[in-house]
Amino acid sequence: ASSVIRALDVLSDPWSFLILREAFFGVRRFEALRGNLMIARNILAERLGRLVAEGVLERRLYEERPPRFEYRLTEAGRD
């Protein structure tokens, strides 16, 4: 599949597109994304998991106790 078709597949979901927009503006943390987008936790968790699985975002530990993660654009995500 071409890169355009793959990108459209990832971005065809409106929530995924909005999450990526927030990531480009520097929003990285789950609660900040949830607050900015007014999105349900389960939907946000599912979309973030998909974007990580697709290699668009990476999940990074930023606090150990309790474990907390942030989501950063990968090189592919920036492209």
Image (cartoon, rainbow, N blue to C red):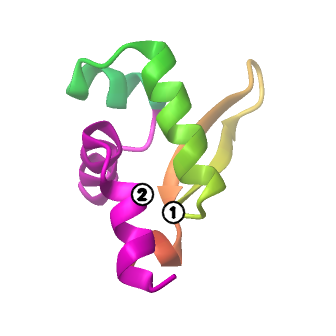
Write the residue at 74% across / 18% down: 66
Quarter location, residue 28: top left
User: Does residue 60 sit above or below 64 in this rendering?
Assistant: below
Q: Secondary structure at mark 1?
A: loop
Q: Secondary structure at mark 2?
A: helix
* Residue 29: image tag: none
Q: Give neighbour class at mark 1: few <14, some 14-19, many 20+ (Cα, 10 Å).
A: many
Write the residue at 50% across / 56% down: 72
Residue occupied by mark 1: 56
Q: Amino acid at mark 1?
A: Val
Which region of the structure is painted magenta?
A: 1-29
Quadrant for the C terminus in the image = bottom left
Where's residue 45, x and y in %?
A: 53, 27
Q: Magenta segment, principal secondary structure?
A: helix
User: Does residue 70 sit above or below 12 in this rendering?
Assistant: above
Outermost residue, front side: 1
Q: Is residue 10 magenta?
A: yes
Quarter location, residue 14: top left
Residue occupied by mark 2: 10
Write the residue at 27% across / 47% down: 22
CB atoms at circles 1 and 2 under 8 Å apart?
Answer: yes
Q: Nearer the viewer, residue 54 or 37?
A: 54
Rounded to the nearest angstrom, the CA distance separating label 1 from label 2 is 9 Å
